[in-house]
Image (cartoon, rainbow, N blue to C red):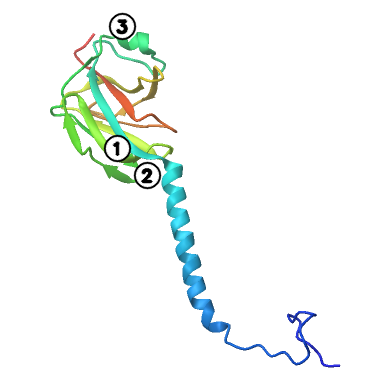
Amino acid sequence: MATRARHEARWTAEDAVVKGRVARNRFWVILVLFGLIAVISTWAFTRQLNFQDLQVQLQICQEPLAEDATSADVEAAGCTPTDVTEERVRLWHQSSPRDPVSAEGPTWQFEDVPIDTVANAVQVDLPEPARSVVLFDHDEGTVRTALTSDAADTRWTGTVGTRGPTSYWLLVTPSQAG
């Protein structure tokens, strides 16, 4: 009785001979697999982070707002949209800054922002010091985050949080207000 290789099927005939070279087919199969993995990974990444356009509207308030402010508090603070002039907003995703693609009236427009991530932050540079700056989710009627300032109270920064909307109000209370 002839011995068979371990990988040989039991039903293989005694005189069967394997023809062709298996090794030559391996390279293109590996390339196809790597390409498929890259396509699936890219698709999953963009779907998971939910890339969308984002709008941030500048509003000036007469009274400072706290981190627990509601829509009624915003209305009571006398917040009104104000045209963007010397103010500058920048979004950060991890350590990558992103400037707006346009600024019309009171609104900054950002393109292709990953909405569903905790790695987003906002930074605003103001020409004059402010008492408070909050990022307000007007759809939910809640403050998303109260920004913290530098020593001069002109640069304010804060994280956005997770799974945000595509539109925010940036509520600024100047130092002279109230």
* Comes first in the chain, label 3 or label 1: 3
Residue 112 at x, y = what percent?
31, 41
Disc 2 to disc 3: CB gap under 8 Å:
no
The structure residue drawn at horizontal position 49% and vertical position 60%, both measured from the top left corner, is 37
* Comes first in the chain, label 2 or label 3: 3
Q: Quadrant of the C terminus?
A: top left
The structure residue drawn at horizontal position 41% and vertical position 40%, both measured from the top left corner, is 50
Disc 3 to disc 1: CB gap under 8 Å:
no
From what the image shows, is residue 98 above or below residue 63? below
From what the image shows, is residue 99 above or below residue 131? below
Residue 113 at x, y = what percent?
33, 40
Question: Disc 3 residue type?
Answer: Ala
Question: Disc 2 residue type?
Answer: Gln
Residue at mark 2: 94
Residue 137 in which image quadrant:
top left
Mark 3 and mark 1: span between their CA atoms?
28 Å
SS under mark 3? helix
The structure residue drawn at horizontal position 18% and vertical position 35%, both measured from the top left corner, is 102
From what the image shows, is residue 22 above or below residue 170? below
Residue at mark 1: 91
Question: Disc 1 residue type?
Answer: Leu
Q: In which quarter of the image is the N terminus?
A: bottom right
The structure residue drawn at horizontal position 30% and vertical position 9%, both measured from the top left corner, is 75
Residue farthest to the left, as pictured? 85
**Left or right side of 48 for 8:** right
Residue at mark 3: 76
Residue 159 in which image quadrant:
top left
